Image (cartoon, rainbow, N blue to C red):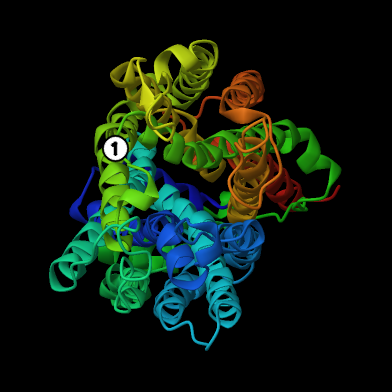
Amino acid sequence: MTAGSMEVLGALDKAKTQWYHFTTIIIAGMGFFTDAYDLFCISTVTRLLGRIYYYDPATGKPGSLPPNVSSAVNGVALCGTLVGQVLFGWLGDKLGRKKVYGYTLLLMIITSIACGLSFGNSAKSVMSTLCFFRFWLGVGIGGDYPLSATIMSEYANKKTRGAFIAAVFAMQGFGILGGAAVSIIVSAIFRHAYPRPAFQVDPIGSTPHQADYVWRIIFMFGALPAALTFYYRMKMPETARYTALVERNDKRAAIEMGRVLQVDFGDFASTGNMNPVAQRVAAPEYGLFSMQFAKRHGLQLLGTTSTWFLLDIAFYSQNLFQKDIYTAVGWLPPGKTMSALEEVFRISRAQALLALCSTVPGYWFTVAFIDIIGRWIIQLMGFFFMTFFMLILTFDYYHLRGQPCPNNPSKYCGGNHIAFIVLYAFTFFFANFGPNATTFIVPAELFPARLRSTCHGLSAAAGKAGAIVGAFGFLYAAQGQHTGQPDPGYPRGIGVKNSFLLLSIINGAGFFMTFFVPETKGRSLEDLSGENEDAEKETVGSQSHRDLSTVNPV
């Protein structure tokens, strides 16, 4: 790193918060709004897909997706996300953040629309094309993780960097809320236009033919927020840190940052002059698979990957229990007592309430306090309280839920339903005011600029591997232990109570793995990555080289 680089990056670290910082939050955040919308809106229409394409009159129950189809529809986007995180993380370091940033959003726009246009004359063909498009949707979503986090971290000053990155990630909360809101509105419009009786009154008539448009409209609407910010994302300049530290063009870094931020770089932006003593004497740069990287950042990468992996097992598997909890507290009546569109409406309303009361506040508590409390404390606190509340749900499960009602075993009588939903909501609150946000932030701060996007992508991919374990594994594990309790097509599992206990252990492991992650609050990216230390060595080396060259031989 040259003196010019140090001047440019030092000015960025000390820059005041400006309008362009908020513009960047919106541009990058809209990608995460779309990410969350597309990943979580599937839960509002899964039962509708089962009613439309997999109704079997012989069962006497509303249609439901077979286990393999449900796993594929819910999990294929997570698999695509993992691929996208690794691929675009590497491309972000190889080609530059700006060059590939727009392509992730373009891929999300195209595939969101394509999901709604899934075609075929049979259930198999429709589900196959839907899974195909959702995989590529996941690739675009995955690419947004390392690029958005890296870009925001490299634009921000060190004083408010954590809040800015957290604000980008917090748009996920609005995406989850937005997906539920769109599902509520679309289902309500179709319910009003095509009123239908409950399934138990008219099994065939309870699902109107027009219901096939509902899930398609919900999926395609996800392209809108991404499309609105695509132009602005393409106009963003490359980050100064990539230009200066990777491309080694200090002057262009100063010029491009000077166009969007009111930062004084002295006369460097116009002349590119620097102290000749500080001219670069190139030192060998270590790679990702080198011993030097392992010594400097190996334990840090272990900490960021393991904590994100453990967090996402718990975070994504918790969504699987919503059906049982909504039923226990009376938010979601048995499917046969509702029409198909009423079921979409009620599921979406319950998801919106949970997001509004726990998920969204948790994100923005992180934004407010992360540069005050610090990343490490928030992550440790989040894992601790997630473990604590999960243990309460485990050991007091039957008392909180109640027992099946004598006259209607599909409902639960007794119990403390308010306490049940509050405790469950607190696990989401402390996930978001905790490791769900910090695991996204810290990998964008710890590693050198030339490896930052790659390491964030690897950390995020570890998280999505955990999400796949949570989504697939606990889909089966949470099934009832006794004959007749599992959902149709599923084998017996360990039950919801024991699943909560297993998740408590996983959250506890995340608590201890947090000790491998250092605090990054208030420090420059170059201090954290060791690039300032390398620069000092190079400056000393260049000074010695200059002194020797001026000594006259005797």
Compared to residue 221, the image places residue 511 above or below, namely above
What amino acid type is highlighted by mark number 1? Trp
Residue in the foreground of this view, choosing between 200 and 498: 200
Query: Is residue 125 something that shows in the picture?
Result: yes
On the image, which quarter does residue 303 sit in? Answer: top right
Residue 474, percent across and down?
A: 63, 39
Residue in the foreground of this view, choosing between 27 and 313: 313
Residue 307, percent across and down?
A: 62, 32
Residue 480, percent across and down?
A: 62, 33
On the image, which quarter does residue 203 sit in? Answer: bottom left
Residue at 43%, 78% in the rendered image: 106
| Residue that label 1 marks | 331
Residue 469, percent across and down?
A: 67, 44
Residue in the foreground of this view, choosing between 461 and 517: 461
Residue at 70%, 38% in the rendered image: 492
Compared to residue 28, the image places residue 10 above or below, namely above
